[in-house]
Image (cartoon, grey):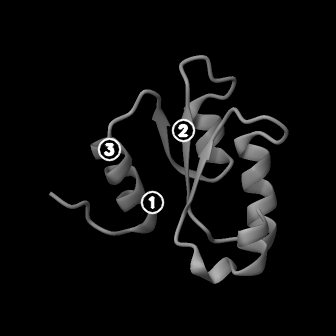
Amino acid sequence: MDAVRREPATFALVLLDVQMSGMDGPATLDAVRAIAPSLPCVFMCAGSCEYTVDDLVSRGGRAVLRKPLTLHQLGEAVAKAIGTPPRE
């Protein structure tokens, strides 16, 4: 959070785990959006996630990945979230 607060323009995307100690991913995204409202987000979630994919998308997630995930899945989600074609 401190890095986003100091230099929000240097970030192209935020990658958040849904389940984190303290503030969960959706609450963290709410705090980030207060600073950088258009910053894209990709959520990652374990199988026992308390939010549905629809919940996370409605909260501002551009993609939701289930763990375990592959680098290919992560790359595709990031590319989609920032609006660039994925690399082959």
What amino acid is found at the position of numbered circle 2 in the picture? Met
Q: Which of the pair 67/85 is nearer the observer? A: 67
Q: How many numbered dots are placed on residues in this image?
A: 3
Task: Report the residue at 41% width, 57% height from top.
Answer: 78
Provide residue 71's location: percent of width, then percent of height: 32, 44
Task: Report the residue at 59% width, 80% height from top.
Answer: 10
Q: Quadrant of the C terminus?
A: bottom left
* Residue 76 drawn above or below residue 11: above
* Residue 59 drawn above or below residue 70: below
Q: Which of the pair 7/34 is nearer the observer? A: 7
What amino acid is found at the position of numbered circle 3 in the picture? Leu
Quadrant in the picture for residue 36: bottom right
Provide residue 45's location: percent of width, then percent of height: 56, 31
Q: Which of the pair 73/81 is nearer the observer? A: 73
Crowd band around label 1 with a 10 angstrom C-alpha radius: few (<14), some (14–19), many (20+): some
Quadrant in the picture for residue 53: top right
Tell me the residue that label 3 is attached to.
71
Crowd band around label 2 with a 10 angstrom C-alpha radius: few (<14), some (14–19), many (20+): many
Secondary structure beneath disc 3? helix
Q: Earlier along the polypeptide chain: callout 2 or callout 1?
A: 2
Tell me the residue that label 2 is attached to.
44
